């Protein structure tokens, strides 16, 4: 299972997402997590993971850090005017992603975004950065921007759904915020 939640008490009330899966993508996850264990000089458990054949049209892939950024940008680039993009984001400040959202909107892509207000963090009042100015900017470009109704907790989810009239969809469920720190390999 991969989830967006932080495993500590201070984050227990946050709104998060998770995905439970089996099959070949487990190898992707193992390889990426193994790299972290090696970097930390931790014991690496033995495994006999074997790729399994996929019997349907679904494709699941595990991505981390900069790979997430590339997947988001590619999804935004590939979106057509007939597509609908729906997003839920805790933090969005990566200028390249913001630029691609604006370009997609200029092409006529329908974009709906729910943002965390960034007003609370573990009982401390915050200024609304970075989402409030970014949300205002994206709204000016015509995106449908809404604010998560939080009451001390955070809308901690990170999700991008692209729905096409053909019935094909792309769903990116991430644990990384759309920030330079998370997407440019500065934070695991």
Image (cartoon, rainbow, N blue to C red):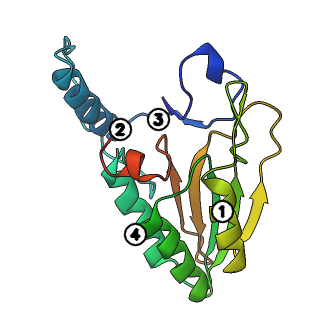
Q: Tell me if I can see residue 50 in this picture.
A: no
Question: Is residue 167 rendered to the left or right of residue 21?
Answer: right
Q: Quadrant of the C terminus?
A: top left
Mark 1: secondary structure: helix
Q: Distance between the residues labelled 2 and 4?
A: 21 Å
> Disc 2 or 4, which lies upstream in sequence?
4
- Judging by the rendered image, the residue that carries numbered circle 4 is 74
Say few, some or many: other residues with alpha carbon within 10 Å of mark 3 (under 14 / 14 to 19 / 20 or more): few
Q: Mark 3 and mark 4 in contact? Answer it, CB < 8 Å.
A: no
Q: How far apart are marks 2 and 3 (CA)?
A: 24 Å
Q: Mark 2 and mark 4 in contact? Answer it, CB < 8 Å.
A: no
> Disc 1 or 2, which lies upstream in sequence?
1
Q: Nearer the viewer, mark 1 or mark 4?
A: 1
Can you give x and y, in whole percent of width and height, for residue 130 in the image? Answer: 60, 53
- Judging by the rendered image, the residue that carries numbered circle 1 is 133
> Disc 1 or 4, which lies upstream in sequence?
4
Q: Which of marks 3 and 4 is in front?
A: 4
Q: Nearer the viewer, mark 2 or mark 3?
A: 2
When the figure is inspected, residue 19 is found, relative to residue 81, above or below; the finding is above
Q: How far apart are marks 1 and 4 (CA)?
A: 24 Å
- Judging by the rendered image, the residue that carries numbered circle 3 is 21
């Amino acid at each position: 299972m991969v989830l967006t939640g932080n495993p500590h008490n201070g984050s227990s009330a946050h709104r998060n997402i998770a995905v439970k899966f089996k099959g070949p993508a487990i190898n992707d996850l193992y390889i990426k997590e193994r790299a972290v264990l090696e970097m930390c000089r931790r014991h690496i458990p033995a495994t006999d993971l074997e790729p399994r054949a996929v019997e349907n049209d679904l494709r699941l892939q595990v991505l981390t850090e900069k790979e997430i950024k590339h997947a988001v940008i590619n999804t935004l680039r590939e979106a057509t005017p007939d597509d609908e993009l729906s997003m839920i984001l805790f933090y969005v400040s990566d200028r390249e992603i913001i630029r691609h959202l604006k370009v997609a909107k200029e092409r006529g892509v329908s974009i709906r975004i729910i943002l965390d207000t960034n007003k609370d963090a573990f009982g401390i009042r915050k200024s609304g950065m970075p989402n409030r100015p970014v949300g205002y900017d994206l709204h000016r470009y015509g995106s449908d921007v809404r604010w998560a109704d939080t009451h001390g907790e955070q809308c901690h989810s990170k999700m991008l759904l692209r729905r096409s009239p053909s019935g094909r969809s792309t769903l990116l469920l991430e644990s990384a915020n759309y920030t330079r720190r998370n997407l440019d390999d500065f934070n695991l």
